[in-house]
Amino acid sequence: MKPKSVTLHPDLIRHPFSQNFKGARVSKKSPMLTDYRQGKRHLFISPKKGDIFHICASLDTRYICCSTHVISHISNCPFECTYCFLQNYLTDTTLTVVADTKAIMAEIKDKVAKQPWRFFRIGTWELGDSLALPPLNQMAAALVKEFALTKNCVLKLRTKSSAVEPLMDLDHQGKTVVSWTLNPPEIIAKEEIATAPLEKRLMAMEKVARCGYPIGLHFDPMILFNGWQNAYEGLIKMVFSAVRPKDVIWISVGSLRFNPEMKKKIENNYPSSKITAQELVLGDDNKFRYPRPVRQDMYSLILDCLKNVGADQCFTYLCMERWNVWERVFGRYPVSIGHLDYLIARSVHKRFPKTCPTMPPKGKYMALSY
Ligand code: SF4
């Protein structure tokens, strides 16, 4: 999938990354497209302006959040998931990539140096897909090389693509986790338009696991449909015939959620999608979700399936859920966001010591405030 147009900021003309875009239009301004779907087809390569490293914007202290950090150097995405929150978020919808890796790393190094004891999980997927197409995957490869040299950070790439070629043969030092968002083929076909089919994602996953990258799995958003139980059970069997539990660093599980304004956008942009037609309840964070008993059943099914394939050793957590849902699903819950951050770091230290070489200090995590 090639962009229809590429615009290069003049400050980046001599940047090595820009050599892939000879003949691009040169301008200080992005095409400033406001149509969500049109913007996906036009690429703007931009220098870094302002800070782009921060804690995940979805963090909400009413939930037990995983408190990941993110770099928002990608904005918009060539894929078209019907449930994507970007359709209600972006004003300039042009697919934009900040190409200046050195400047991005300088900001990260400066900020993480203030908490040298902490294990920073840093994602590149907040406003787009980490690997969707060149140049996003080439940019990701440049970051993999930089993160290999860091002490207390791990790069989290997250994708629905199979475009992993630029990641092959890199000396990643276990400092990059390559993750896939996964759904059964029925959902991929109807709700994750233009993304890679499941078999292709799994072939790509197998390849990067063979290169020694830790693998992340995200069953999020789980979506209800007739036969969802068998479909998710089949999905987990397929995933673990492609990778071994010992390759998987963490697994997150979550369900469909969106705010009322997004509901209207989904219905306008994707009239054939049925995801807004299920029973949904509005939470006090102004997001629709499936009723709590339904969500609990969905998450419990995933846990049972993981147990059945011998993957219960992989650290598994819920995304944007409260302690009562955790308790019902796992029989226990982290007492705070800092506690979950600690539990993830402790699990990574035990199972992937190259990725998190030092034992995380529990007291410092428990004292974190958000
Ligand atoms: S892959 Fe992610 S960012 Fe891209 S359209 Fe789907 S949900 Fe949105």
Image (tube, rainbow, N blue to C red):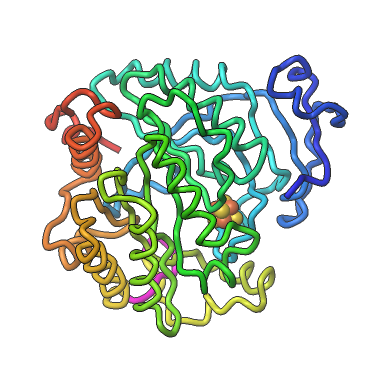
Is residue 331 toward the left or the right of residue 297 in the image? left
- Where residue 359 sits, quadrant-wise, is top left
The residue sitting at 30% across, 29% down in the picture is 355
- Where residue 82 sits, quadrant-wise, is bottom right
- Where residue 66 sits, quadrant-wise, is top left
The residue sitting at 50% across, 15% down in the picture is 106
Q: Is residue 255 above or below residue 272?
A: above
Q: Can residue 222 be found in the magenta stretch?
A: no
Q: Nearer the viewer, residue 32 or 283?
A: 32
Q: Nearer the viewer, residue 24 or 235?
A: 235
Q: Nearer the viewer, residue 133 or 332?
A: 133
Q: Can residue 287 be found in the magenta stretch?
A: yes
Query: For the magenta stretch, what is the residue range?
Result: 284-291
Q: Is residue 364 above or below residue 96?
A: above
Is residue 33 toward the left or the right of residue 164 in the image? right
Q: Is residue 5 above or below residue 87?
A: above
